[in-house]
Amino acid sequence: MYKQVDNKQNVKAVLFAGSHDFGRCPMASRLPTALWPVVGKSALEHLSCHLSHQGVKHTVICSNGNGSLMEESIHTNNHLKLKFLDELLPSGTAGCVRDAADSKKDELIIVFPASMVCPPKIDVLIQAHKKGQSDLTVMFNPVYGNGKLLGESAGIYICQTSVLEHIPKDGYFDIKEGLIPELLRAGKTVHTAILPNPAGNFRDRQEYLSAISNCLENTTKLSADLKHCRRRGSQVVWIAPDATVDPSARIYGPVIIMDGARISEDAVILGPTVIGRDVSIGKDSVVVNSVLWDGAQVGPNCEIQRCLIDYNMALYGNTFVEEKAIPFRQEGTLERSIGCVSKIVNNNAAGFQHALQLQLGEINKRLPDWVQAQKTKIMLWIVAGLVFIAFLWSYWPGLVSLWNVWQRSDEYSSGLLVPFLAVYILWSRRHDIAQCPIKPSVWGLVAFVAAQGVRFFGLLFLYSSAENLSIALSIAALVLMLFGWQLFRKVSMVLLFLCLMLPWPNRVQAAVTLPLQSWATSSAVFCLEVMGYEVMQEGNIIHIGQATVAVAEACNGLRMITAFFVISGLVVLLVKREWWEKLIVLASSLPIALLCNTARLTITALAFTVLSGEHWEKIFHDYGGYAMMPLALAAIVVELWLLVKLTIIPLKEEAIIITRQKKL
């Protein structure tokens, strides 16, 4: 039965973040609904901030294989203790509660769906559970316009830890189909309550737009998120200071226009509508009851009604869309490239070629002699420059996506350095590269077509890793096509080095994350025991003395592995050693990374036995990894030194010719 909750310290929130939802909505198949934005923040971060402001200290976020992605999307203060529960196998809603709760501690568990726009106050939920005096309280949204009638389920449940004994210890178990019938069979009570206002939980485009609309109509709920915007008149139009709105544009609220947005002349925006950051609305375009995510571009004379537009999605002029969710890949660069090729084919190629030859002939007569002598090489470099510009234009969305991964993810932040390091390596080899004859190869064209096939596969089946791989493959194919086999062989290792800038496929990362996390915990415990400390391990938690150190998923060592591979690859490409020595250095990156991560965790655990406080925890968590980089580089240098000492370099023997001069 219900037990009195003295304070919110005994409240634990469990958030169901879920994963990609294939089939219900094209946007949900590309991006989990928990990461859909709510006025600049993801729904998950919006809910986490709400819980923090309500005084909840402990929150567990449950997801299916997207734990690292969810963790990267949250930037809350340190007052909220977040734990990410990444269930690789489905365990059901009740199973997630079982795995997230502490059965030994008497606490109140409140379950939320992470895809929520207007979460209710914690006090309201506690009072509803207290009033029902039941083992489990199920919250429902009110019927629109009548707060006393039971509407659809809000997906919010309140219960004590006592219900955990009715949940199997393992396997799949749901709340609605499993836990509630089990409680009723055991003679327990289940209570239903109605929220004072709709919570705005959503699963697809229609529910998302409806939740945003209801929330915008009561802008006081978003006042904290809109504090940097200015309100415009009585039309409830919020405009960020950095937004640009043409005076001739007509805006009828409720409308939110965020930083960097540009509204062109004679555009019409009818609320409820949210215009995200850096969104551009073209001249004479109309936007009605829609949400445009950051970076979306709307051309002139467009009409958008009740639509959801994805990040960086571009709609060309004179486009009409209604009741749709338009993901980025629906009209991506591949269709744009095909459209441009078809336009070129339809032009009068013969007439264009004749006019071009005449103009080139006139230009050739006026060129200096040294230019005419090097005309072939100059033209080749011009063509290479044009191809490079076309490559950037075609792959720009993919490059922007890579940039965002490098900025958001600690595991792959080292990939940002790879292109610059590759340029430096090529510069250091510039004299050898300059001696290679330039002979374009048709095989490069075949390889480029194959790279585009990989890209098309990624676009068609929504594999971002295949799209990213096609970037490196296309660069290699263009080098072969423009410069030929001899130069391609010279720079082949540098081209292979570029693959280190790409993030790992999600399935590979999910498969190695848990084993790496377990290895990091067990190895740190082993080192501490060897040093004579009494240590106890519970899963990924280390108890040493009076201190407790939790090895989070971000501490599994994947960041060090990717960074050390970049360092080792750079050293291998710069030093002049035998191929087998370079192979040893490259293969040693993995054990060096794991050992360095073990050393970091061991030192951190020892430090926590002496130091305490969030300030020290942040220092050791954020800067401990950077301190391992010099250690890894020193290990590689020592390794190269040992290889020199353990091997004998054969000396070339030269014949010595001795001559005797005759006496005169």
Image: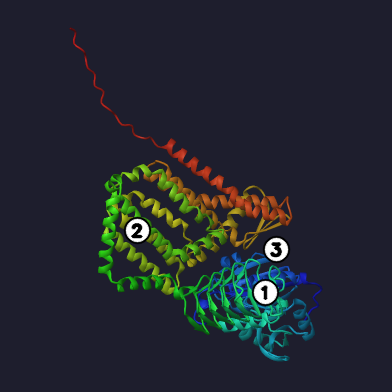
333 and 411: which one is in front? Answer: 333
User: Residue 560: x and y, percent?
Assistant: 54, 54
Q: Residue at x 58, y 77 (%)?
A: 291
Q: Residue at x 28, y 53 (%)?
A: 364
- Above or below, 141 against 484 in this view is below
To which residue does mark 2 refer? 478
In primary-sequence order, the first of circles 3 and 2 is 3
Quadrant of the rendered structure where residue 168 is? Answer: bottom right
What kind of element bears circle 1? strand
Q: In this rendering, would 32 be left or right of 194? A: left
Judge whether residue 171 can be spotted in this image.
no
- Extreme-top residue of the structure: 664
Residue 213, image x, y percentages: 64, 82
From what the image shows, is residue 264 above or below residue 354?
below
Pointers 3 and 2 in contact (C-beta within 8 Å): no
* Residue 366 seen by the camera: yes
Q: Which residue is mark 3?
A: 77
**Callout 2: helix, strand or loop?**
helix
Residue 627 spot, x, y in % from top left: 60, 48
Q: Nearer the viewer, mark 3 or mark 2?
A: 2
Which residue, given by chain and number where applicable, does mark 1 sit on? Answer: 238
